[in-house]
């Protein structure tokens, strides 16, 4: 941490600078992504379209629905595109206030957190969404045709992918807790059965009301929990064991009263 302390106004000016740069970057990312709005939405809708019956398509009900849906897709994609720059601005603002030993943990946490978040989104996109939609679209009949709207699909898919991205941060959160000594590998292993119960309850809340989606979220979480136990054992806070009587008393005669 820098010994020279800046006044509050200087911190506020620095924060204002970082926020302005971040908003400008997101704005530029938005305009770039808006130029590719149809392509981006087609990529997002691909898991649904592969499960739709022959001739099926997305629709928009209100006049402005397609326009606002493309705007939202472009904005979300713009944030994702510029996220490395925005994360750097956050780091540049926070880093001067950290000790050197704290700084060395930030980069690994950011990289591991980003990795697991992207892994969760990819799992949701390539595995969970197609299987979930196949199950849900199975309720279609000759008299009931699926006609999902663009707005509803965007809202559903973004929430679904975000949920998978966040739950895949499970190992990172538990390793942080293990590192600061809140939990340890033995405690996690001992409470495995309660964790599995909570995982299935969490999956039921976070996914649509079908058993397929719940299982598809719960199974990876169970695997991530086991991975968290391993990581906690490796990277967790090491307990300092007291010296044994044999080692500590070697070469010394017992004290007499």
Image (spheres, rainbow, N blue to C red):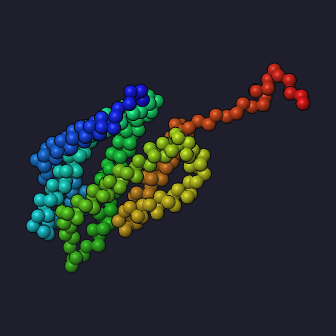
Percent position (x, y) of residue 162? 32, 54
Percent position (x, y) of residue 114? 35, 42
Asked if residue 232 can be seen in this view, the reply is no
x 21%, y 38%: residue: 21
x 70%, y 33%: residue: 242
**102 left or right, relative to 30:** right
x 21%, y 67%: residue: 148
Percent position (x, y) of residue 150? 18, 63
Q: How many numbered circles does the render carry?
A: 0
The quarter of the picture where the N terminus appears is top left
The quarter of the picture where the C terminus appears is top right
Percent position (x, y) of residue 151? 20, 63
Which quadrant holds residue 67?
A: bottom left
Q: Residue furthest top?
A: 251
x 46%, y 63%: residue: 201
Which is nearer the eye, 58 or 239? 239
Which is nearer the eye, 16 or 151? 16
Which is nearer the eye, 17 or 181? 17
């Amino acid at each position: 941490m820098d010994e020279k302390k800046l006044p509050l106004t200087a911190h506020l000016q620095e924060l204002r600078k970082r926020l302005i740069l971040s908003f400008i970057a997101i704005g530029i990312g938005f305009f770039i992504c808006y130029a590719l709005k149809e392509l981006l939405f087609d990529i997002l809708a691909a898991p649904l379209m592969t499960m739709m019956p022959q001739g099926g398509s997305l629709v928009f009900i209100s006049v402005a629905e397609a326009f606002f849906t493309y705007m939202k897709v472009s904005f979300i994609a713009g944030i994702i595109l510029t996220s490395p720059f925005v994360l750097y601005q956050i780091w540049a603002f926070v880093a001067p206030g950290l000790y050197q030993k704290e700084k060395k943990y930030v980069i690994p946490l950011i990289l591991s957190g980003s990795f697991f978040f992207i892994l969760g989104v990819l799992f949701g996109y390539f595995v969970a969404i197609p299987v979930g939609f196949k199950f849900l679209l199975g309720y279609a009949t000759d008299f009931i045709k699926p006609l999902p709207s663009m707005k509803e699909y965007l809202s559903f898919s973004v929430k679904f992918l975000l949920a998978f991205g966040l739950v895949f941060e499970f190992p990172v959160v538990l390793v942080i807790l293990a590192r600061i000594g809140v939990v340890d590998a033995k405690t996690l292993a001992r409470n495995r059965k309660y964790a599995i119960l909570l995982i299935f309850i969490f999956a039921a809340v976070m996914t649509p009301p079908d058993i397929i989606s719940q299982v598809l979220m719960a199974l990876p979480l169970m695997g991530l929990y086991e991975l968290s136990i391993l990581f906690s054992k490796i990277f967790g806070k090491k307990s300092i064991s007291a010296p044994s009587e044999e080692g500590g008393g070697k070469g010394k005669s017992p004290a007499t009263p």
